[in-house]
Image (cartoon, grey):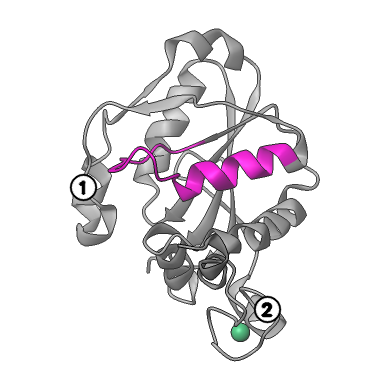
Amino acid sequence: MNLFNLLPFIFPNECLFCGKEKEGSICKKCQTKIFVRGESKTQLNNKLFYLSIYKNNGEKLIEFLKNRKYFSLIPYLIDESLFLLDNEKIDYITSVPSLKFLAYIPEHLEVFSKDLSKKKNIRYLELITKIKRIKSQVTLTIQERNLNPIGAFSLRRDYKNLIKDKRILIIDDVYTTGSTLKECEKLIENNGGEVLSLVYSKAIIY
Ligand SMILES: [Zn+2]
């Protein structure tokens, strides 16, 4: 098969959200609807930056990246992130590890995090590894979500000394109860690091 036949799928012409405008993967109009950049706090009272609201297009954004592998969306997310992180001192960037079913298919969080690290000229570290299989948080009750990620992650031993007194940006796709991120924050804080986080999308829990 000719590779160029695949290009419209990798770089679609029409906006993925409205299907109308031909300005790239997200048209200007949809960009203003989807990206409502903001700052909040995690359970452990660390800074949490978000690019969108889950119920308001964020869910779709994540679905496109996670299941359909529309990586042409990543540059838009990077631009939004650069605005948010402009005044932040960051020493390293890392991401919440996810379960890879197929090792040869790149995973969106890793691709995004590595691209952001290049743009900001900050080293990306695979700091955290998954040591226990966890269920998808979306299908669980709030109580189950809080217990689910406990003990699921571990800090890579060879990086432990590197993070003392350093400020680490952790990247995840969605923030719901914050229990997954909390586990990762604890690992870094327990080893003397400081944490701030960035997610594509934040759920609002009433
Ligand atoms: Zn659009």
- Residue 90 is one of the magenta-drawn residues: no
Instruction: Categorize mark 1 by other alpha carbons within 10 Å: few (<14), some (14-19), many (20+).
Output: few
* Residue displayed at 70% across by 26% down: 91
Q: Is mark 2 within 8 Å of ligand 1?
A: no
Magenta residues, start to end: 95-118
Q: Residue at x 44, y 56 (%)?
A: 174
Using residue 188 as the reference point, say whether residue 117 is left or right of it: right
Q: Amino acid at mark 1?
A: Lys
First in sequence, mark 1 or 2: give its number.
2
Residue 135 is tagged as 1
Q: Tell which of 14 and 206 is nearer to you.
A: 14
User: Does residue 136 appear to the left or right of 118 in the view shown?
Assistant: left
**Residue 125, image x, y percentages:** 56, 26
| 200, above or below 6, in the image | above
Depth check: give the residue in front, 7 or 172: 7
Q: Which residue is mark 2?
A: 32
Q: Residue at x 37, y 69 (%)?
A: 206
